[in-house]
Amino acid sequence: MFRTTIILTLLSLPVAAANFYVSPDGDDKFSGSLPSVNAAKSDGPFLTLQHARDQLRKIKPAGNTVFLRAGVYELPAGIQFGPEDSGATWRNYQGETPVLIGGRRISNFTPHQGQILKADLAAAGLKNPAFKQIIFAGARQHLARYPNYDENNPYGGGWAYADGKIVGIYQEVPGENKHTLVYKPTDARTWAHPEEVEVFVFPRYNWWNNVERIASIDPATHTATLAKDCSYAIRPADRYYFQNALEELDAPGEWYLDKRTSTLYFWPPVPPVSSPAGSKSAWELKPGGQWQQAGGATANTTAAQTTDHGPRTTDSAKATVSIPTTRTILQITSGTTDLTLRGLTFECSEGTAVTLQKTTRCTVAACTIRNVGDYNGSGVTVSDGSNNRVAGCDISFTGSHGIGLSGGDRPTLTPANNVADNNYIHHVGVFYKQGVGVSMNGVGNAATHNLIHDTPRMGIMFSGNNLLLEYNEIRHANLETEDTGAVYTGGRDWISSRGTVIRYNYFHDILGYGREGTKWLSPYFAWGVYLDDNTGGVDVIGNIVVRAHRAGLHLHNGRDNLIENNIFVDSSQQQFEYSGWTDASRMWKDHFPTMVKGYESVFNQPAWKNMRHMELAPKDAPLPDKTIMAGNVFQRNIVAYHDPKAKLFRGGNVNFAYNTFDNNVYFHAGLPLITGTLKKGETGDDFAAWQKAGRDTHSLVADPLFVDAAKDDYRLEPESVALKLGFKPIPVEKIGPYKDELRATWPIKQAEGAREKPLSQ
């Protein structure tokens, strides 16, 4: 009896969590139980992540941790975690920086011609190499191109322009195809292998780009025929460049892969700004595998201690050439639960760096993800599953999106509760110009407390239901495209993005880039909050929108949206815009079958009964005057602006009997408010006519009394009339990232971008 009691007691004691360690100095023959190799060199950490994973599986991973020491871990085929790895934590050791690359480091370079080096990849163990990017000194290099990349004007420079007579982007052209580029005679090129050359082009609408291979060249007509269709026709004055020809390797930072001989050609770039003052020499590879700036100190190629923009200093940088050999660095597969990645750095992959597919309560936290992804590759994607988090990460220079979230069930409105929180995301969409900071779909997912800047298109793009966009700061967005916004959604299926809340965000300097005739302009054609194409049932509450070019808010045939308690400041053209359809509009007719299908897919579902105005079917939407927009409420907002030419409101096909405006504060720095109410030839006070027509009957024209608008402090003085009309102070102190143990860096040092170097024409 006594012995049995002792045995039962011992069995009930908690089992201590096991820790494993991995290090570039380790050995998979070791036990992995020591953080460093012992003095006798008989034991120490593991060498590879794969071995650590397999050993951890033997003791059941739940509650156990694998610590990664500083250094570079090559994962040429990536690494995969599954249900058998649930419950484990993989993290950095005591603040160190382990770097996981989805490829190989290359150092067998030899001189080729001038500053150009070459490496035999077959001799380095890489057979049939195929990749579209290389990383050197912490920065993605440029595939050899014409015209060359313009580092002093990265958005407005470095382009060729299609030849021909200008055609308006919204003008239809009979017989037009999507695979023909007519180039100017001055842009004619000669290549040994034109069939390898690609065209990187923004076709027609300037909404996003395509990268397509050339099938043939007709020198007589200056015509390049592409192997595949682009999204739209390539029209005269559309901007493009050619890439992927050895003949175009003529500038520092360019490279080219000859697949026929497995040879990589590379002209190392001018060192980063931390180089000695005035130095413009490129890197050279010295005997022994060291990179050296002419006249400068060396940089060993065996590690990758870099910043987002290159080595920290030329005398201590660990510069290396890395090439991706896998699409995904780390995959977490279906059925995995409670797995945590923390404090790791991911770099160099052809596709998305980290993917979570149908996982539950998995976390990617305090990680740095940079220089990853091609046209279809992002930083982190969470696909389906539930209660997963991407938190506190620094994500930059991704081929497509920074973070992608999806999941949840639409018919039942079951939320996925996947969250992107407290992340710092910048310079996304390197290859795919529809790439955004956070792309969010599904039901019940959230993007909160993120800082997003320097994006080619939107900061956050979303579509689904009951989504949450809260406490985010988005700035200097839409640097390369037009007809866009800080945040964007559409409702062509009638039910998107109903139930979504956009609350307590700060959107500012929303620029846009587009063309009028042959002149390219920025800012151009960009909004703050953009609810496009019949979006319905979205709440826009408590946001601050500053310096959005076209307007702070755009409802494009929106319906049932609540716009309340926001501050809109200094849009250049108008402050808010309503663009409606009629039942004769092409857009309404084209999308009507899709709207009916979307409505019928959910209107009988119990979960949808409480969704705002879901009792109305698309067929019943046209009003007596044949317009569609209805149910939108614009109330208790503050609108303030200075530009004498700017309007308060611009609208079309809006029945004001079905769209409400009231209890707002408007201020045009003492100038008249222009709403478009007065008809051509009429004189008088336009805003008075607006009010006489029954709009904004309780609204006031008055200075809202911001604390310091010149310094972008839009808190209100206690005497503000807006407070008397029921405006509630916005919790600005909560907007943006916050200090947390799961934050990759703090305080955040924001990367240089369009704020520091504005786009030049």
Image: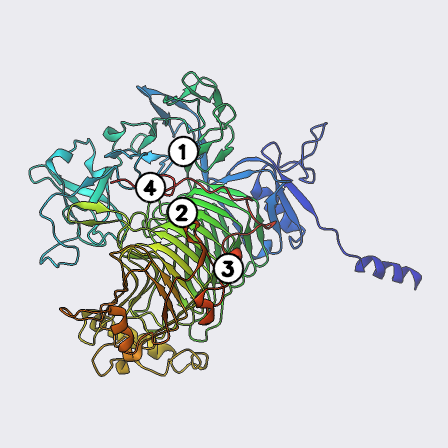
Q: On the rendered image, what quadrant is the N terminus found in?
A: bottom right
Quadrant of res 91: top right
Instruction: Look at label 2 and name its amino acid.
Output: Gly
The tag earlier along the polypeptide, 3 or 2, is 2
Q: Mark 4: which secondary structure?
A: loop
- Look at mark 3 in the image and give the residue it sits on: 419
The tag earlier along the polypeptide, 1 or 2, is 1
Are the residues at dot 4 and dot 3 in contact (C-beta closer than 8 Å)?
no
Mark 4 residue crowding within 10 angstroms, few (<14) / some (14–19) / many (20+): some
Mark 1 residue crowding within 10 angstroms, few (<14) / some (14–19) / many (20+): few
In the displayed image of the protein, which residue is found farthest to the right? Answer: 2
Q: CA distance from mark 4 to mark 2?
A: 30 Å
Q: Position of residue 518 (x, y in %)?
A: 16, 45
- Give the vertical position of 625 relative to 96 (above or below): below
Q: Is residue 443 visible?
A: no
**Disc count in the image?**
4
Instruction: Look at label 3 and name its amino acid.
Output: Val
The tag earlier along the polypeptide, 4 or 3, is 3
- Look at mark 2 in the image and give the residue it sits on: 351
Instruction: Look at label 1 and name its amino acid.
Output: Leu
Residue at image location 51% in from the left, 33% down from the top: 305
Residue at image location 31% in from the left, 34% down from the top: 152
Q: Nearer the viewer, mark 1 or mark 2?
A: 2
- Look at mark 4 in the image and give the residue it sits on: 758
Q: Nearer the viewer, mark 3 or mark 2?
A: 3
Q: Is residue 93 left or right of residue 750?
A: right
- Look at mark 1 in the image and give the residue it sits on: 126
